[in-house]
Structure formats: C-alpha cells, structure tokens
Amino acid sequence: MKHSAAEILREYGPFPGADRVNGVTFDGQHVWFASGDKLSALDPASGKVQRSIEVAAHAGTAFDGKHLFQIAEDRIQKIDPKTGRVLSTIPAPGNGGDSGLAWHEGTLWVGEHRSRKIHQIDPETGTILRTIESNRVVTGVTWVDGELWHGTWQGDESDVRRVDPRTGEVLERLEMPPGVGVSGLESDGGDQFFCGGGRSGKVRTVRRPKRGSATGSGSEIPVDSTSK
C-alpha cells in the first residue's frame, strides 16, 4: 500500500451562515457543499459562494450531470439545482448513519459512517446492489478514472484513501495533517479532490497523486460501475 502526506492546495471558508461542511460535490463549474439546512454553490476560482438552496443537507452530496442528490437524515433527496425543488426521495441504506455520497455510471454510492461500509444503490428505489467493507469509518466517497476513494476521520486522524472496489482493500492513503478532517469527498475529474472540513466550516482542495502507466492492483478491473 502506498501512503503519503496529503498535499493541501487551497482552503475556502469558513462561510457566513455555514458553521460546518458536510457533503461536497462538483458540477463541473461549482463545488456544492452541504451545511445542515442548505446547499451552497462555491466558485472554486474566486472562492465566493454564488447561490444557496434551502434544503435539508445533513451528510453526503452527489451530482449526476443534471440533478443533485443530498442525504437528509435517513433519506436521499433528488434535487433540481435550478429551482431547488426536491423531486423525489429514496431511503438511505444506513437508516440515518449515512455519510458520503457519489454518483457513478448510473448508480449512487453511499458511505455508512460507523458501520464502515460503502453501498452501491439503485437511485430510483434505494435498493442495495452491493456492499464493500472498509476498515475505518467512511466520511466521503468519490470515483475518478475507475478508482474508488473514500475519506476517513477518527479522533485527530483523517485521510483520503483509494480502495479496491471489489474487496475494499486499501491501496493508497493520503494522510491529512493532525486535526484536519475530511467530512465529504469529491473529485474534480482530474488531479484534485474537494474535501469537506466538518466543523471547521472549510472546503479544501487536495492534490490527487499522478498516475503512471499503471495505477495499482484492483483499480483497473471493471466492476458494476466504473469511471464517471
């Protein structure tokens, strides 16, 4: 397993009226972050919040190219980002213990925090399609280039880790500085991760390690869903 210190490239926030950052996602232009009672769209170039949607936003956030998905207590809401309207809801697999959320080739991937699991679910029904076990709590989930990554945060220690999407084996770890936690995780589709900072009220960008001709065991093997 590879491990290295996370390279934090930039910090945003804290933001007025948002005392914590839960889930984060990226729509190709804005970083959306959940802060309890609203979703806000952050311009990563300027660092300014462009707009907010008042909606329950307690944990992970995802974007499917058209809609936002947001964990609210024990359910997942499908939201029209243009109007802010909740279009539908499905049950969350952790029944309120859910954390990270990611969209990946037609399905949602949901972290179950203290149960140390990642579930792949049907976005229409909430049916669990498969489950991956982790060896640490899961605080954020993202896919990029066929790689499954998740955040962890226990006590004063936090990291971003790449895992085998079949077995959950840890392949790579990016260790955050002591006291700096990851509460939500999203890739920009390239060489950066956006990380929620929990009660710090911050969003951070972390460099994704460069890849050579091979990315390591397991990450290139197709599973039910592959890259975004």
Image (tube, rainbow, N blue to C red):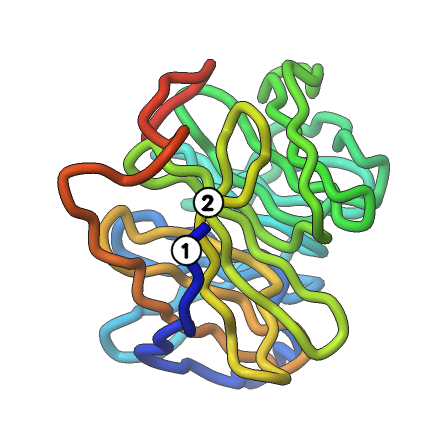
Residue 2, label in figure: 1
Instruction: Tell me which residue sits at (53%, 85%) in the image.
Output: 14
Left or right: where does residue 46 sit relative to residue 74? left
Residue 132, percent from left and from top? 65, 29
Looking at numbered disc 2 in the image, what kind of residue is underneath it? Leu
Q: How crowded is mark 1: few (under 14 residues within 10 Å), some or many (20 or more)?
A: few
Evaluate if marks 1 and 2 touch, with contact meaning CB atoms under 8 Å apart.
yes
Residue 76, percent from left and from top? 68, 36
Residue 105, percent from left and from top? 39, 22
Looking at numbered disc 1 in the image, what kind of residue is underneath it? Lys
Residue 171, label in figure: 2
Q: Is 30 above or below relative to 92?
A: below
Residue at far right of view: 95
Image quadrant where residue 85 sits = top right
How many numbered marks, from 0 up? Answer: 2
Image quadrant where residue 93 sits = top right
